[in-house]
Amino acid sequence: MLSMACKDAIRAMIYIVKKKSDDFISINEIAKELDLSFYFLSKILQKLVKQGLLESYRGPKGGVRLAKKPKDIKLLDIIEAIDGNAFFTECVLGFKECSDSEPCAIHSKWAKEREKIHKLFANTTLQKIEKELENKLNIKL
Amino acid sequence: MLSMACKDAIRAMIYIVKKKSDDFISINEIAKELDLSFYFLSKILQKLVKQGLLESYRGPKGGVRLAKKPKDIKLLDIIEAIDGNAFFTECVLGFKECSDSEPCAIHSKWAKEREKIHKLFANTTLQKIEKELENKLNIKL
DNA sequence: ATTATTTAAGACTTGAAAGTCTTAAATATA
DNA sequence: TATATTTAAGACTTTCAAGTCTTAAATAAT
Ligand code: FES
Ligand code: FES
C-alpha cells in the first residue's frame, strides 16, 4: 500500500519530530539511526522539502528540520507528497473511474473502508504520534 | 494494494460466476469480454487452478470453471492465491515484525482498519457478489 | 489419423520503482 | 582563502512486477 519511499519518509519525519530540535538534523544521522540508505533517504527527503513539509540547509551544521509545527503535519501530507493520492481515489479493481454512480462490484464496501483509512491518516498528526511515543515506551522507530 | 494480476483475477472470477455455466468458459472469451490481455490472464488463471479455485480443461470446448460453489469462494481466497497475505500481516511502515507486542508508531490504529479490510474480503463470497450484480444494475464488470 | 482448439509451462521483454553514485552548489570553520 | 561538510540534482544500475510470445500437451471434431 505505501511505497518503500513513503515508509522511509514517515519514519524519518517521526525521528525528526521526536528529536524536538530547533537545529537542522543531518540526513546522514537520520539514515544511520533508522538503518536506511543515505542515498535513498536523501532523494526522498528532497521531495518533502519541495512539498514544504521540511526545510533544509546546506553546509556544516546543515540538514533538515520541520517546516511546520508538528500539529500541522499529518501523515496524509507525507503520503500524498511521496505516493500521491491514488490509493484513496482509484478503483480497487483497476477501473478507470471510481465513484458511487459508476461502481465496480466491491466499490460500496471498499470505498467505506478506504475512507476510514483516509481519515486515519488525515487525523494522525506528528504531534499525536509524538505524544504516543512518550506514553507508550515499546514503540519501534 | 492489489496487484494488477489480482485485480484481473477477481474480475475474471466475477465474470465466470455471473455466467452461471456448467460448461468450461474459454480464457479467450473472458479476456475479450473484460478487455484484458489473453496472455496475461492465462498466466493468472493458471494460479487459480493450482490453488483449487478453478478447474480447467484443454482442447475444443475447453476452458475454466469454478472448482467450488460460489458461496465457498471468498475474495480473500483469490487475493491470497495471487498476492499472498502480505498486506494483512506486514507492518505498514516496513518493519520486519508486526504485532501488538512490538508495535510501530501507527500499528494500533492501522491494524484495526487492516482487520476490517481483511474481514470485508473474507466475508465477500462470489455468491454475494453475484446477488448484488442482480440487484444493482449499474455495476461495472 | 489429422486438424483445430484450447490450456500449461516457461522463456523472454518491458517498464517502473528501488537503490546507488557522481558532480555541483551552499556554507561554516579554520 | 581554503577546506570540510552538507544538501541538490540528476545520471546510472538493479530488481521485480507486468506483459508478451513460443512451444508442448490435451482433446474434440472431422
Ligand atoms: S469503482 Fe471500484 S472501488 Fe470504486
Ligand atoms: S508494527 Fe507496524 S503496522 Fe504493525
Image (cartoon, coloured by chain):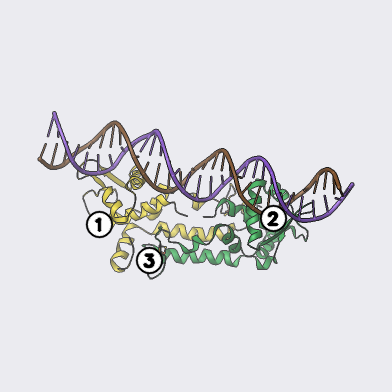
Chain colours: A green, B yellow, C purple, D brown
Query: Where residue A18 appears, x then y in whole percent?
Result: 71, 58
Q: Determine the residue positioned at 58% across, 48% down.
A: B97
Mark 3 chain: A
Q: Determine the residue positioned at 39% across, 62% down.
A: A106
Q: Which mark is residue A103?
A: 3
- Ligand 1 is within 8 Å of the C-beta of the residue at disc 3: yes
Secondary structure under the numbered disc 1 in the rendered image: helix
Query: Where residue B107 appears, x then y in whole percent?
Result: 58, 57
Quarter of the rendering occupied by the C terminus of chain B: bottom left
What amino acid is at disc 3? Pro
Mark 3 residue crowding within 10 angstroms, few (<14) / some (14–19) / many (20+): some
Mark 1 residue crowding within 10 angstroms, few (<14) / some (14–19) / many (20+): few
Depicted A72 relative to depicted A39: above or below: below
Secondary structure under the numbered disc 3 in the rendered image: loop
Query: Where residue B19 appears, x then y in whole percent?
Result: 25, 57
* Label 3 in the same subunit as label 2: yes
Mark 2 chain: A
Q: Which residue is mark 2?
A: A15
Label 1 near label 2: C-beta < 8 Å? Answer: no
Q: Which residue is mark 1?
A: B19
Mark 1 chain: B
Label 2 near label 3: C-beta < 8 Å? Answer: no
Q: Nearer the viewer, residue A86 or B75?
A: A86
